[in-house]
Amino acid sequence: MKHKQHPLKVYYNSACPVCNAGIKNQQGKMQGCAVEWKDVHSNTQLVAEIGSDIEYVRERLHVVDQQGKLHVGWDALLTIWQHSPHEQWKARWFGLPVIRQAGQIAYNLFAARLYRWNRMKKHW
């Protein structure tokens, strides 16, 4: 018996203009893919689905893959690319050990600064 595959679940913060633009762009690339886009700004209760804190989800992208595993930050981005037509090469390349490690560091630094900027601008 074949099991129904669950959609990818992407938890993002639309109140951040940079994040929102990135998600809108990705949504265009993934039309027709099994993805649930979950905006934690418009519905803060969504964070309960992943057992996370609203502020942490505002700071970093969260994705639940089709097996139910949670990916955060850079790994969430890699997971999206793995499921995006014409972007699997990005997941393979940026997922290589040394590149992945550098990507995680860069993502975390950028996310922390962007989060502080959004708070300063009172986007939420």
Image: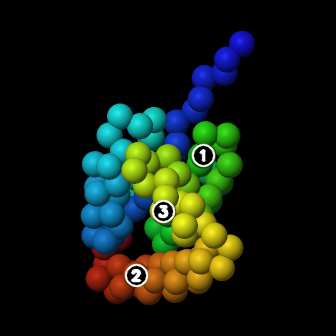
Q: Nearer the viewer, mark 1 or mark 3?
A: 3
Q: Tell me if mark 1 has few (under 14), some (14-19) or many (20+) residues whose alpha carbon lies within 10 angstroms of its own.
A: some
Label 1 and label 2: CA atoms lie apart by 25 Å
Q: Residue at x 53, y 60 (%)?
A: 91
The earlier-in-sequence mark between 2 and 3 is: 3
Question: Disc 3 on helix, strand or loop?
Answer: helix
Question: Disc 2 on helix, strand or loop?
Answer: helix
Q: Tell me if mark 3 has few (under 14), some (14-19) or many (20+) residues whose alpha carbon lies within 10 angstroms of its own.
A: some
The earlier-in-sequence mark between 1 and 3 is: 1
Q: Nearer the viewer, mark 1 or mark 2?
A: 1
Q: Nearer the viewer, residue 86 or 71?
A: 86
Label 2 and label 3: CA atoms lie apart by 23 Å
Quadrant in which the N terminus is drawn: top right
Report the residue that reaches farthest toward the top: 1
Label 1 and label 3: CA atoms lie apart by 17 Å
The answer to whether residue 11 is seen in the rendering is: no
Q: Residue at x 68, y 49 (%)?
A: 69
Q: Residue at x 41, y 37 (%)?
A: 33
- Proximity of marks 1 and 2: CB atoms separated by less than 8 Å: no
Instruction: Say if 5 sits above or below 39 in the image.
Output: above
- Which residue position holds label 3? 90
- Which residue position holds label 1? 65
Quadrant in which the C terminus is drawn: bottom left
Q: Position of residue 50 (x, y in %)?
A: 62, 51
Tell me where residue 76 sits by quadrant: bottom right
Query: What's the residue type where badge 3 is placed?
Result: Lys
The answer to whether residue 105 is seen in the rendering is: yes
Query: What's the residue type where badge 2 is placed?
Result: Leu
Q: Nearer the viewer, mark 2 or mark 3?
A: 3
On residue 74, the disc is none
Instruction: Say if 77 sits above or below 39 in the image.
Output: below
